[in-house]
Image (cartoon, rainbow, N blue to C red):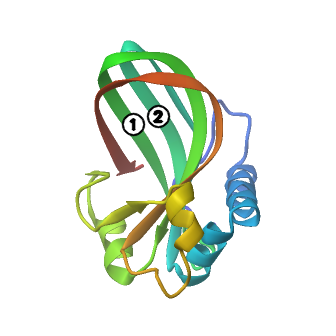
């Protein structure tokens, strides 16, 4: 097994089952989002967080588990956590994938002891407007982020700090 950490949640799922679920989430994203498929075709690696939960009322938090796939093979387990403060209320679930486009981005993810989105290599959050003009020729940044499967409602304004760490 290429993942050298135990990928078990509550003792119910095997590491193989979790890797399969994470692959399925990534496959669903690229099947439903042509710009994500273009990014995947050029990416050296993809860090997938298929189920992030965010909740808050004034104070908020979010968290989720992810797997890094390098050339399609699982190479590590990650987690994302965030805290926020401000005028906010609600609960939301979503997934996101970070497409690592060059070796510098892959090295950054592998060699840091936790990093915040917005530090390190440039991260481009791909929204619907940008997605319309994204082609394999316009992929020039180190990391592209796509969200998917948003459910629930989270509304508000506030300050947030988000961190990604290797388990």
The residue that appears at 65% across and 30% down in the rendered structure is: 10
- Picture coordinates of residue 11, whole percent (x, y): 68, 33
The residue that appears at 32% across and 44% down in the rendered structure is: 163
Q: Is residue 56 above or below residue 114?
A: above
On the question of residue 40 being in view, the answer is yes
Extreme residue toward the left, this view: 119
Residue 63 image label: 2
Give the total of numbered labels.
Answer: 2
- Picture coordinates of residue 131, whole percent (x, y): 56, 65
The residue that appears at 52% across and 78% down in the rendered structure is: 43
Residue 66 image label: none
Extreme residue toward the bottom, this view: 137
- Picture coordinates of residue 121, whole percent (x, y): 28, 68
> In the displayed structure, does residue 161 sit left or right of residue 77?
left
On the question of residue 70 being in view, the answer is no
Extreme residue toward the top, this view: 57
Q: Which SS class for mark 2?
A: strand
Q: Which SS class for mark 1?
A: strand
Q: Which residue is mark 1?
A: 81
Q: Circles 2 and 1: CB distance less than 8 Å?
A: yes
- Dot 1: few (<14), some (14–19), or many (≥20) neighbours within 10 Å? some
Quadrant containing the N terminus is bottom right
Res 8 quadrant in image: top right
40 vs 130, nearest the viewer: 130
- Picture coordinates of residue 166, whole percent (x, y): 39, 53
Q: Earlier in the sequence, mark 2 or mark 1?
A: 2
- Tell me the CA gap for discs 2 and 1: 4 Å
- Dot 2: few (<14), some (14–19), or many (≥20) neighbours within 10 Å? some
């Amino acid at each position: 097994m290429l993942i050298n950490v135990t990928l078990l949640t509550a003792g119910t799922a095997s590491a193989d089952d979790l890797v399969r679920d994470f692959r399925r989430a990534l496959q669903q994203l690229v099947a439903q989002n042509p710009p994500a498929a273009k990014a995947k075709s050029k990416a050296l690696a993809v860090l997938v967080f298929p189920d992030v939960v965010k909740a808050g009322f004034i104070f908020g938090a979010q968290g989720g588990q992810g797997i890094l796939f390098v050339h399609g093979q699982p190479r590590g387990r990650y987690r994302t956590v965030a805290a926020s403060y401000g005028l906010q209320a609600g609960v939301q679930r979503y997934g996101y994938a970070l497409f690592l486009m060059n070796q510098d981005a892959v090295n950054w993810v592998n060699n840091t002891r936790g990093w915040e989105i917005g530090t390190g290599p440039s991260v481009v959050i791909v929204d619907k407007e940008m997605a319309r003009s994204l082609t394999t020729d316009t992929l020039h940044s180190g990391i592209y982020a796509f969200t998917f499967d948003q459910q629930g409602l989270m509304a508000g304004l506030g300050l947030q700090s988000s961190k990604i760490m290797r388990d």
